[in-house]
Image: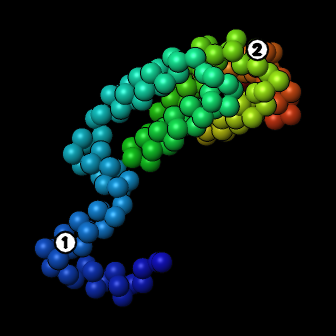
Amino acid sequence: MSLSTELKQAISHLPSAEKDKLLFRLLRKDPDMCQRLYFELVEEGDSLAPRREEIQAEMQRILKFDPYSPGYLMMDLRPLNGTITRHVKHTRDKQGEIHLTLYMLRSCLELHGAFIIAHLHRADSLQNYLVKRLETVLEKLSKIHQDLFVEYEADVNYLLTQLHTRIAPIHAHKAKLPKQWPD
């Protein structure tokens, strides 16, 4: 529902105490907005690095275990991606999204690449998931300044090489992923 100009004016003329009461009621119903305001107002945006490190520690904790099957590995990756999404929603950290997604994908392939290769006959959906995640990262990388490419080049090229040669060559070819980045 969009706010009409009359409603906006009526809200702006409310007493401060009444506005505060309404704001607190609304914040109770929207925990994501509450987290975002906490990050911006209380932490004043100074906690990006610790938040990223916390997410990386969670990734290490989850990915250190040997998966039962490629499907279970994908079930471990999806919630991690959700954690990254919530981080971006709360902090508006676009570079953090790229960094954390690349970290997740690289960690997965470094720790479980041999497992995925040994189970290629059952890893179709996992292969597709890995390719789609990297496609998303490449799309986001195309929107940032080229001077920042150096920071991500090694990780992206490692992932592209692994996907094209060992992990998901058919899916990478179908998705038209480049073999080298940046072009």
What's the residue at 61%, 13% (across, down)?
A: 110
Residue type at numbered disc 2: Ala
| Residue type at the position of mark 1 | Lys
Quick check: 174 left or right of 104? right
Find numbered disc 2 in the image and state the secondary structure of the residue it sits on: helix
Task: Report x, y in % for residue 144.
Answer: 57, 36
Left or right: residue 42 versus residue 154 is left
Tag in front: 2 or 1: 2
Q: Which residue is drawn at 51% across and 34% down?
A: 80
Q: Earlier in the sequence, mark 2 or mark 1?
A: 1
Picture disc at residue 123: none
Neighbourhood count class around disc 1 (C-alpha, 10 Å): few under 14, some 14–19, many 20 upward: few
Q: Can residue 151 be seen in this view?
A: no
In the rendered view, would you say 172 is above or below 153?
below
Name the residue tied to disc 2. Answer: 118
Q: Is residue 90 above or below residue 58?
A: below
Residue at the bottom extreme of this rendering: 6
| 24 relative to 163, above or below | below
Q: Where is residue 3 in the image (x, y as percent from the top left)?
A: 42, 79
Given residues 171 and 92, the one toward you in this image is 171
The reply to whether dot 2 and dot 1 touch (C-beta < 8 Å) is no
Residue found at the far front of this picture: 68
Residue at 60% across / 34% down in the picture?
75
- Name the residue rendered at 72%, 19% in the picture: 116
From mark 2 to mark 1, how far is it between C-alphas? 59 Å
> Mark 1 = which residue?
21
